[in-house]
Image (tube, rainbow, N blue to C red):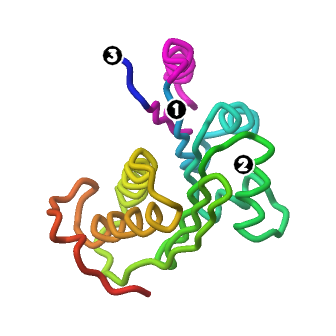
Amino acid sequence: MRPDWLYYGTLFQAGPGRGQTKKLAQALPGAKRLYDINLRRDSYTPQLIAELLPAANVVKLNEDEVVAIDSRNESLRDFTEFWSRNVGWSAVAVTRGARGCAIRIGDDYAEVPGYKVKVADTVGAGDAFAAAFLHGLAQGWNAHGCGDFANRVGAVVASRPGGVPSWSLEDFAAGERR
């Protein structure tokens, strides 16, 4: 098995899985690595984050996590450009809740508005967003295309109860922008 991607998050790294992910990364040197920061209170240390950030090719985080990582008051455009250039990320997705997301893929940057939905349950919406973002990257889509698709998928999941709700392709055909 030679996967194209290795997807990891902070929660798993804070426990016994930390060594396993490092072993996987070493065993799969050709696999790209997406780090979903997903900070939860009392589940990480600054040292752990400092170790995991540069190991990633692609990072997904939310606006609160941007501030936790880099407290300078800069724009999301500046944040994504600085960290991509200085750490070597090929792409970054910053989720902004109902307001959509900011996406950087190389030099291509877009702030993409979200979709209006009646929120039933936010559990799983971030993971759905990350999966859709990764799909767009794998397809070679631009920043706006990746962000729009990821916003649509995240919105549909948030509009349904449960972390892994049922959906169909028709659910993504239409949507009202914020």
Q: Residues within 10 Å of mark 1 (few under 14, many from 20)?
A: some
Q: Residue at x 49, y 79 (%)?
A: 113
Disc assigned to residue 84? 2
- Residue 79 spot, x, y in % from top left: 75, 60
Q: Residues within 10 Å of mark 3 (few under 14, many from 20)?
A: few
Mark 2–mark 1 contact, CB under 8 Å? no
Disc assigned to residue 151? none
The quarter in which the C terminus is drawn is bottom left
Disc assigned to residue 32? 1
Task: Note whether 83 is above or below 98 in the view shown.
Answer: above
Mark 2 vs 1, N-terminal side: 1
What count of labels does the image hold?
3
Q: What SS does tag 3 mark?
A: loop
Mark 3 vs 2, N-terminal side: 3
Disc assigned to residue 1? 3
Image position of 100 (left or right of 72): left
Amino acid, disc 1 = Lys
